[in-house]
Image: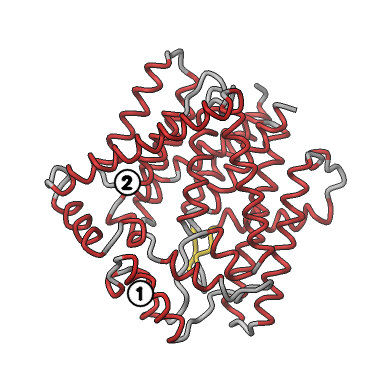
Amino acid sequence: MTIDDKVKYAIAFALGVLNFLFISSFAQVIIVEIIFALAFVVAIFTFKNKAYGKIREFRVIFLLGFLWFAAQIASDIANRTNTTDSIKSVAQIFVLLSLIYWGHYWGNRDVTTLKSYIFGYAFSSIPQYFFLPGIFGLSDPWKFIFGPAFTLLSLLFIPRLRHSKLMTSGVLFTLVCFDFIMGARSLGMITLVTLVLLLRKPLKQRGLIGTASYLLLISLLMLSTYAIYANLTLNGSFGSSQQQKFEKQSQAGPLLLVARSELLYELQAIRQTKILGLGSTPYVDQNYLERVALIELEAGVHHPSTTAFTQYKRDGRIPSHSMILSAWMESGIFGLIFWLYLTWLVIRTIINSTGREPIFGLLLRFLTINYLWAAIFSPLGAGSRMMIAITITLVLQEKIRNT
């Protein structure tokens, strides 16, 4: 390794660590993302050698991404969206494309640079906790700061060691147990699925029956794990805080519709989107709210107890908590197509891989499972843009490696 290489890797690591720095103005602006976005603007006008963009999937992502970008602008104009809200939404799309662009560029030039950045990104959790933890980070540091970071580091380090399948399984199972003990249910489930999908051969080679059997096994395992977790939580085994939170959610209705109460609002709004969508952060009227309340009543959800209703009462806007549904709702069909294409790339990677591939196999498996959860049940924001970009970068790298 030359001195220039060491400097390059150190810079990549430092950029990763700096992900904890942000400024708050009309939105939460992460300094590193601004650097990547500005560099992307320069690259668009100055780069002559675009050999790293010859992979078809990369070109399609950016074609669909710019269509989404243009559709969001058109939707905001058509719906007379507040200028500040429009700028936030459009800027977020541009930043996400910038991150994917540079991740793919680094991965093609030198995969160690990409690794160094991911290591730095994981280690950024330490200064984040001590200097800029935020409300959620202070109240639940494992779930919102240390849990995801420690999992990333573990999945990067495990392939470096001489280990058996039993050791890998043991590490992942320990992480799953600790996640549930600390109340990080989503992270625990994603890690559990990662463990189950450590296959000797990819799903595509198992045939329809084999694949269906595996999916059934995963479903049964997740339901069983949830039942055990629910029983232990209600008994107070994980502390009074988790017990009270779980009891409150259970009493309000079906857990998924309570914990992700925004989904019903988004699905109801999508019925009105047509082609262009409703614009950035659309407001709702009383008739819309009454229709959502009726659906929740039929589903057994206590309408006033949900987080989505609380958010609506605060600002009068349609609550959103899904990358796919939010893009569809706000920018219409082109936002939906972009996310469906990314989702197809991720699903294809899961089907084709075993989680044991060289370089990023174990981490790639975890990130692709995490993507499926996040794209459906989590919002696109400051805490998720980088994870999505890293995931798509590794998906593209795996495609190049198999070409």
Across and down, in percent, residue 77 comes to 69, 81
Q: Residue furthest right?
A: 48
Which residue lies under the disc numbered 1?
309
In the image: residue 44, left or right of residue 324: right
Q: Quadrant of the N terminus?
A: top right
Q: Position of residue 94 (x, y in %)?
A: 67, 61
Q: Nearer the viewer, residue 324 or 51?
A: 324
Tell me if residue 293 comes above or below residue 185 in the rendering.
below
Disc 1: CA contacts within 10 A as few (<14), some (14-19) or many (>=20)? many
What crowding class fits label 2: few (fewer than 14 Cα within 10 Å), some (14-19), or many (20 or more)?
many
Q: Position of residue 296 (x, y in %)?
A: 35, 70
Q: Which mark is residue 127?
A: none
Cα separation between marks 1 and 2: 23 Å
Which quadrant is the C terminus positioned in? top right
Q: Which residue is mark 2?
A: 184
The total of numbered circles placed on residues is 2
> Dot 2: what SS?
loop
- Residue 321 sits above or below residue 6 on the image: below
Residue drawn 46% across the image and 34% down it: 215
Residue at position x 60%, y 69% in the image = 89
Q: 396 above or below 316?
A: above
User: Which residue is more in the foreground, 152 or 193?
Assistant: 193
Identify which amino acid the numbered label 2 is placed on.
Answer: Ala
